[in-house]
Image: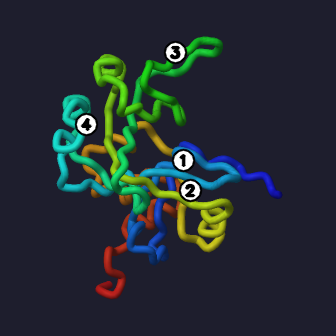
Amino acid sequence: MTEVSSLTGRLLVATPALADPNFDRAVVLLLDHDAEGSLGVVLNRPTPVGVGDVLLPWAPLAGAPQVVFQGGPVSLDSALGLAVVPGEARDGEDADPLGWRRVHGAIGLVDLEAPPELLAAELGSLRIFAGYSGWGPGQLEKELVEGAWYVIESEPGDVSSPDPEQLWRSVLRRQRNELAMVATYPDDPSLN
């Protein structure tokens, strides 16, 4: 079996060639990636459902827009909380707050069963996702070879973008290579 280099914490940005409507212009943050498969959430699919409509205790901590995001096509009836906690973990110290598990850098998963008061003072931002995006062993690697995704370094602000509908373009635009040009790709190339 070949070793899989972990992409945990990176963004998968859908290429214009990706034909799956679930991922059209999607920006996916990978929360886990190893030989067993991959799991992530789509960062730029806000729904009309307010956080207070489904998880009222967490609503005051949710960043704008205070809506639930569709994290992907898998398990839409489950919720995932993703939050940024400013500051870095220190070697030898358990610096992560209770109810939060670091995924990458300042980004981590929130235990939505925990009392929100545990994290209220620590969170920089919170997003709630319905469902997730998942890939079986080798599936994502195959899609990468086929050119379905750009792999880009994430920034903590990507999780809490106040304008999630523009995240695909803004993530591509900040690249210092030919990917910045892809941000100008028309929504419907046949109208070009």
- Residue 175 coordinates in the image, percent (x, y): 48, 53
Question: Which quarter of the figure is the N terminus placed in?
Answer: bottom right
Question: At 52% from the left edge and 58% from the top edge, which residue is drawn?
Answer: 134
Mark sitting on residue 63: 4
Q: CA distance from mark 1 to mark 2?
A: 7 Å
- In the rendered structure, which disc, 2 or 3, sits on the residue that comes first in sequence? 3
**Residue 65 in view, yes or no:** no
- In the rendered structure, which disc, 3 or 1, sits on the residue that comes first in sequence? 1
Q: SS at mark 4?
A: loop
Q: Label 1 amino acid?
A: Arg
Is 181 left, or right, of 135 in this rendering? Answer: left
- Mark 3 vs mark 1: give the one in front: 3
Is there CB contact under 8 Å for labels 2 and 4?
no
- Residue 158 coordinates in the image, percent (x, y): 39, 44
Per the image, the residue denoted by label 2 is 151
Of residues 162 and 139, which is closer to you in this image?
Answer: 139
Per the image, the residue denoted by label 1 is 10
Is there CB contact under 8 Å for labels 1 and 2?
yes
Mark 3 neighbour class, 10 Å CA radius: few under 14, some 14 to 19, many 20 or more? few
Of residues 147 and 57, which is closer to you in this image?
Answer: 57
Of residues 117 and 77, which is closer to you in this image?
Answer: 77
Question: Which quarter of the figure is the C terminus placed in?
Answer: bottom left
Question: At 19% from the left edge and 35% from the top edge, which residue is drawn?
Answer: 56
Is there CB contact under 8 Å for labels 4 and 3?
no
Mark sitting on residue 95: 3
Question: At 38% from the left edge and 58% from the top edge, which residue is drawn?
Answer: 168
